[in-house]
Amino acid sequence: MQRLHPQATNKPARGSLLGIEHMEAKDILGLLKLARRMNPLKSRPLLRNKRVVLLFYEASTRTRSSFELAAKSLGAITCLVLSSGSSVEKGESLLDTGGTLRAVGADVIVIRHPSAGAPHLIARHLDIPVINAGDGMHEHPSQALLDALTILKHKKSFKGLHATIVGDVYHSRVARSACHLLTKVGVPVTLCGPPEFVPEVASTLAPGLRITRHVEEALRGTDVVLLLRVQKERLAGQKIRVQDYVARYQMTAARLKLARRDAIVMHPGPIIRGLELTSEVADGPQSVIMDEVRNGVPMRMAILARALGKAR
Amino acid sequence: MANDKSRPGSLLIKGGHLIDPAAKINAPMDVLLREGRVAEVALPNKTRGGADEKFDARGLIVAPGFIDLHVHLREPGQSYKETIATGTAAAAAGGFTSVCTMPNTAPVVDTPEWVSWLRNPERAAAVNVFPVAAATRGSGGESLTDFGALQRAGAIAVTDDGKPILDDQVMRMALRLGAELNFPVVQHAEDTRVTQHCSMHEGPTSFRLGLRGMSAAAEAAIVDRDVTLAQQIPESRLHVAHLSTSDALKAVRRGKRAGHGHGARVICRVTCEVTPHHFTLLDEDVGEYNTHCKMNPPLRSATDREAILVALADGTVDAISTDHAPHAAHEKQVEFERAAFGITGLETALALAITKLHREHKIPLTRIVELFSAGPARVFDLRSRGSLARGNFADVTIFDPKKRWTFEAAKSRSLSRNTPFDGWPFTGKVVATVVGGKIVYRTE
């Protein structure tokens, strides 16, 4: 079978980060290593006078602020463009917005967009690197990388680890990126949730994934528990009720005891206390949720440095 | 319509190999066309009449003119995507001598006036245009259009294509009225209640890309219901448009068995068509959000494609139709979920059929010709077409089944370029297209 010709012949520019799926393990490990050398408190003007445009079509607290702080810590100039209050509201297309930002002098575009594949579209039409800061239900590669960095800081190495992801995998870009990343670095992953959130097809995403409907089974002996936000409005149309979800899948201190004693609990945020986890777990000794947020800045420093060819 | 009032002269197509499945001919034959009709079909050099013009068809296949049951020519209202003139020029280049236009234009073709407008010679069509009119007003799915008036104005079938007729009662009434008038009801089978916000087939690829997927069941459920309704209505005619799933084929087979199974009386007629892209591509070809692989129905799984290939070979499928759906570049170069559904297909259909069905899957050329001519002519009862029997319309497609070539979208006669097949190497090419005895396309 012939290869299909994509509409634009351009490849994304070097340094782009569109997703984890097509990355090689050694690139992932290299980025993590670079992130460990980044210190947001000691500014290094690696990206002096470089212009980083943050193009956000969706609300964001963590991702936006940490990309901005990361860029500034490296000496770059940042510019935030939100879909509201910009030409996007007037009906400008994504490609035209991208072209405009390139023309005003962007050296790299960090994009958050509600449509899966939006970063890929813009990257195929621009000659500057594009960084995916979350696209629809597709991928959130910088989140998966900062989670991996958090795991490494607590576990020293990926070797022999096992991870469990509980929650709404179907709607989650964090879950897709995490599944790709963890399995690429040799960490098998168990997905757990009701079929509405963890459809059988989820196991085809990467080799090394398995599904269980029983949270107890999913937790037994695991080293990393990654919880996903459950949006009440997404439960609305589903067969499963909020009370049932809480009863069957909520992370409680009692359930967490089934995991390894030194297991860590992660959550990309924002957390909904009383839904996917109890306050006891969120604030407990095994929770590394704030560490994840903290690691976001050095991780994104590394991503930006790599994007602009300053990865040494 | 081919509408030249001047008397067409005569044309002798000499030295070719005639494949006319309806007449059971698969042999070297000369074909003489005169005054817009087939005057004679005879063994080589045995035609009795003379001709002002001769066409040397040595080494070529001569076939009854191809009929496309499903095209979007975008007029009225969206002439920036395509016009009847440009769309039929593309049809001619693809070997089609007749095309059936879908009514989901702006406005919707739901009145006899619009049907007549489509057939008006001012539209400058290069091939025959047979309008399919809307089944319900504005294709709103609620109140039926005036089937009788539409039929008298020249519509050959009704459909709400692009949307299904969901309401059981409306579909039942459409089939009932269609049965009275011998008017096929064409269904775009998609349970849109479960496919909202979906942009591709539901499967591993949609999950990987984070796109909401249309289930195969959303198509099969509607076909299944329609077949059940058709079986309850004597002499009803149901045609399933662009069928794409294995389960929908099962329902069609059930309908066909029932249609023939009760003595002499025809209970109902269930037919279906398949597109070249559904027998060629898979959902995974969407790759990294290639909007030229976004259409509705979507590209399906390997299992579905396998079932379609079997059904093309065994006779379950009645016709290959293109679902030619031109869109401007700015409607495709957007986020995948926002991109328009559909691809162009008129100029690549025969090449895909020969390259994929004949050479790769060993389906005989006679069957392929049938799927492009006699098959579709039967589906819509296009009298005196689909075969080159003496006295029939002089619509002929002449092609070279061995010619190797590369399709270049930039050279397309369509106004639009939204095809996934740009740059594909093919075997099998149209050499000439004859409508009403006149050559309307000839390869350079």
Image: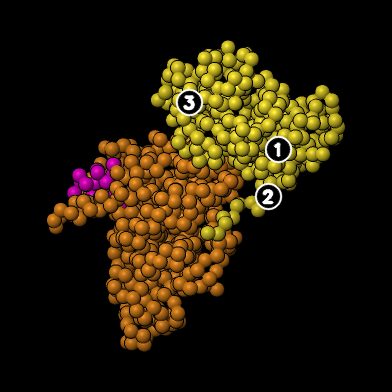
Q: Nearer the viewer, residue B435 or B343?
A: B343
Labelled pair 3, 2 in contact (Cβ < 8 Å): no
Q: Which mark is residue A217?
A: 3
Q: Residue, x 51% and y 18% (percent of image)?
A: A255
Which sits earlier in the primary sequence, circle 2 or circle 1? 2
Give the magenta part as a residue range: B225-239
Which sits earlier in the primary sequence, circle 1 or circle 3? 1
Tell me, yes or no, whether the highlighted magenta stretch contains residue B217. Answer: no
> Around disc 3, counting alpha carbons within 10 Å, would you say few (fewer than 14), some (14 to 19), or many (20 or more)?
some
Residue B289 rendering spot, x and y as whole percentages? 57, 45
Q: Is residue B202 visible?
A: yes
Which chain letter goes with mark 2? A
The kind of residue on which mark 3 rests is: Glu
Q: Is residue B80 visible?
A: no
Res A26 → quadrant:
top right
Q: Which mark is residue A11?
A: 2
Labelled pair 1, 3 in contact (Cβ < 8 Å): no
For residue B4, side relative to residue B293 (left or right) = left
Tell me the colour chain B is drawn in.
Answer: orange
For residue B175, side relative to residue B418 (left or right) = left
Q: Which chain is yellow?
A: A
What is the number of callouts on the image?
3
For residue B147, side relative to residue A244 (left or right) = left
Q: Residue, x 24% and y 44% (percent of image)?
A: B228
Do marks 1 and 3 share a subunit?
yes
Q: Secondary structure at mark 2?
A: loop
